[in-house]
Image (cartoon, rainbow, N blue to C red):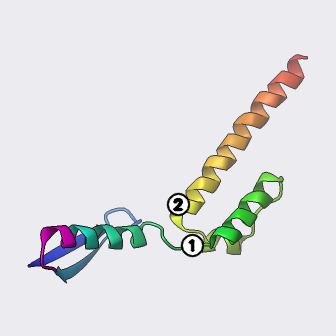
């Protein structure tokens, strides 16, 4: 059985197209999922490097451009979520300190 797969890429309206051959539909679906995981983020900084960058960021220091560029889109999203959370927390603390 042959199939044409279109894997969504990280850019808008972009995809990767490839042909696969398999014996069953389940194998085709499995291959689609495997490739999708690769495209959507199973790359980037290793666990130790990412944890180190996150710890550095949480301690109040910035992360380097090289670290940022080396992150997968999912790792970058985590950093953005943490950044927004820190801003909300700091805003609440500043409001509390100004009231008291």
Give the magenta-colored segment's residue range: 22-28
Q: Earlier in the sequence, mark 1 or mark 2?
A: 1
Please identify the residue farthest to the top as the structure is shown: 100
| Mark 1: few/some/many CA within 10 Å (<14, 14-19, 20+) | some
Q: Is residue 83 left or right of residue 93?
A: left
**Secondary structure state at the residue bearing disc 1:** loop
Q: Is residue 86 left or right of residue 43?
A: right
| Residue 20 screen position, x and y as percent | 19, 81
| Residue 6 screen position, x and y as percent | 24, 70
Q: Is residue 23 magenta?
A: yes
Q: Is residue 95 left or right of residue 15?
A: right
Residue 85, above or below 80: above
Q: CA distance from mark 1 to mark 2?
A: 9 Å
Residue 59, above or below 99: below
Residue 49, above or below 96: below
Quadrant in which residue 12 is drawn: bottom left
Q: Residue at x 67, y 41 (%)?
A: 85
Task: Name the residue tied to disc 1.
Answer: 44
Q: Is residue 27 magenta?
A: yes
| Mark 2: few/some/many CA within 10 Å (<14, 14-19, 20+) | some
**Secondary structure state at the residue bearing disc 2:** helix
| Residue 2 screen position, x and y as percent | 11, 80
Q: Residue at x 79, y 60 (%)?
A: 56
Q: Residue at x 22, y 67 (%)?
A: 29
Evaluate if marks 1 and 2 touch, with contact meaning CB atoms under 8 Å apart.
yes
| Residue 34 screen position, x and y as percent | 34, 71
Report the quarter where the N terminus lies: bottom left
Q: Residue at x 12, y 73 (%)?
A: 24
Q: Nearer the viewer, residue 90 or 12?
A: 90
Q: Is residue 87 left or right of residue 39?
A: right
Task: Name the residue tied to disc 2.
Answer: 74
């Amino acid at each position: 059985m042959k199939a044409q797969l279109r894997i969504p890429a990280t850019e808008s309206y972009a995809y990767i197209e490839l042909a696969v051959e398999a014996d069953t539909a389940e194998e085709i679906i499995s291959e689609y999922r495997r490739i999708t995981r690769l495209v959507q983020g199973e790359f980037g900084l290793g666990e130790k490097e990412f944890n180190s960058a996150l710890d550095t960021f949480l301690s109040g220091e910035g992360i380097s451009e090289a670290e940022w560029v080396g992150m997968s889109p999912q790792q970058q999203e985590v950093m953005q979520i943490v950044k927004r959370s820190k801003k909300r927390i700091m805003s609440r603390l500043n409001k509390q300190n100004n009231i008291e």
